[in-house]
Image: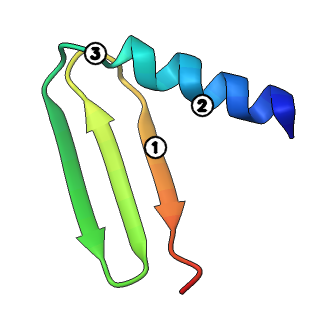
Amino acid sequence: LLSTTRWRTKTLLGLDGRELWMLADGRHVLLTADGTNTLYGARSTA
């Protein structure tokens, strides 16, 4: 779990200064940033 937390922190710091794009659809959220060529996803547990 700790390594996952570190990976997430490092990923977010890498997005600093980039234009973020977010799409929320019900319980799901998709996030990407210009120049990363990566799509991040999250799901609400509430």
- Above or below 8: residue 22: below
Label 3: element kind? loop
User: Residue at image x 51%, y 75%?
Assistant: 44
Give residue 15's mark. none
In the rendered structure, which disc, 2 or 3, sits on the residue that comes first in sequence? 2
Give me the C-alpha separation between circle 2 and circle 3. 13 Å
Q: Residue 19 sits in which quadrant? A: top left
Image location (x, y in percent) of residue 42: 50, 59
Image location (x, y in percent) of residue 40: 46, 43
- Above or below 32: residue 24: below
Q: Residue 17 sits in which quadrant? A: top left
Q: Amino acid at mark 3?
A: Asp
Image location (x, y in percent) of residue 39: 41, 40
- Which residue in the protein does label 2 denote? 8
Label 1: element kind? strand
Q: Amino acid at mark 1?
A: Tyr
Mark 2 against mark 1, which lies toward the viewer? Answer: 2
Image location (x, y in percent) of residue 26: 34, 84
Q: Amino acid at mark 2?
A: Arg
Quadrant holding the N terminus? top right
- Which residue in the protein does label 3 denote? 16
- Above or below 21: residue 35: above
In the rendered structure, which disc, 2 or 1, sits on the residue that comes first in sequence? 2
Q: Is residue 22 left or right of residue 6?
A: left
